[in-house]
Amino acid sequence: MSRFKSIDSKLIDLASKLNGRLTKDRPDYPEVLRTFEERRIDWIENDIMKAIIIQPNFEVNGVNSNIWNFVNIAIYDDGFSIARPKWIEILVDQKDFIFIAENIDELLLKSEENLSNISMKDLV
């Protein structure tokens, strides 16, 4: 059973509200590389790519699914420049997944607030 079962409906609702796309477990990757669960909501607003990402911790020796991260990110990519100005905020850093599940409402609200207020001047 997916560890995301208890929160997927909330992710679907927020993705819809933001006119975003919810992806599960990197569907564009080859099957052999999809060895862990992950969720992300991606959307574009005012030419800025925005994302809410829930993923296990990536370590030198591989993916550690015992600890999880919840990240907000905004990136501008004009397709021509080498630099890609960005903004990142880590809301949860290396915690047990249950922490994310128990705090999902607050994390999604904070993410929506963070990313709704991002503009080009915030990207570095």
Image (cartoon, rainbow, N blue to C red):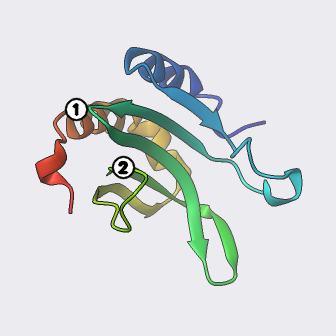
Q: Which of the labelled discs sits on residue 80, or is there none? A: none
| Residue matched to label 1 | 116
Specify the farthest residue to the right: 32
Horizontal and vertical percent for residue 30? 83, 52
Q: Residue at x 69, y 83 (%)?
A: 61
- The single residue placed furthest to the bottom in the displayed view is 60
| Residue 19 appears left or right of 45 | right
Disc 1 residue crowd, few under 14, some 14–19, many 20+, Cα 10 Å: few
Mark 2 Cα shell of 10 Å, populated few (<14), some (14-19), many (≥20):
few
Q: Specify the quadrant of the image occupied by residue 119.
A: top left
Element on which disc 2 rests: loop
Q: Quadrant of the C terminus?
A: bottom left
Residue 94 position within the rendered picture, expressed as x and y whole percent measured from the top left: 46, 65
The alpha-carbon separation of the residues under discs 1 and 2 comes to 20 Å
Question: Which amino acid type is shown beneath numbered disc 1?
Answer: Ser
Residue at (32, 50) in percent of width and height? 76
Q: Which residue is mark 2?
A: 78
Q: Is residue 117 above or below residue 78?
A: above
Residue at 59%, 59% (x, y): give it.
Answer: 56
The amino acid sitting under disc 2 is: Asp
Identify which residue is drawn at 59% across, 28% down: 6
The quarter in which the N terminus is drawn is top right
Q: Is residue 51 above or below residue 71?
A: above
Q: In the displayed structure, does residue 102 sit left or right of residue 75?
A: right
Which one is in front in this view, the residue at disc 1 or the one at disc 2?
Answer: 2
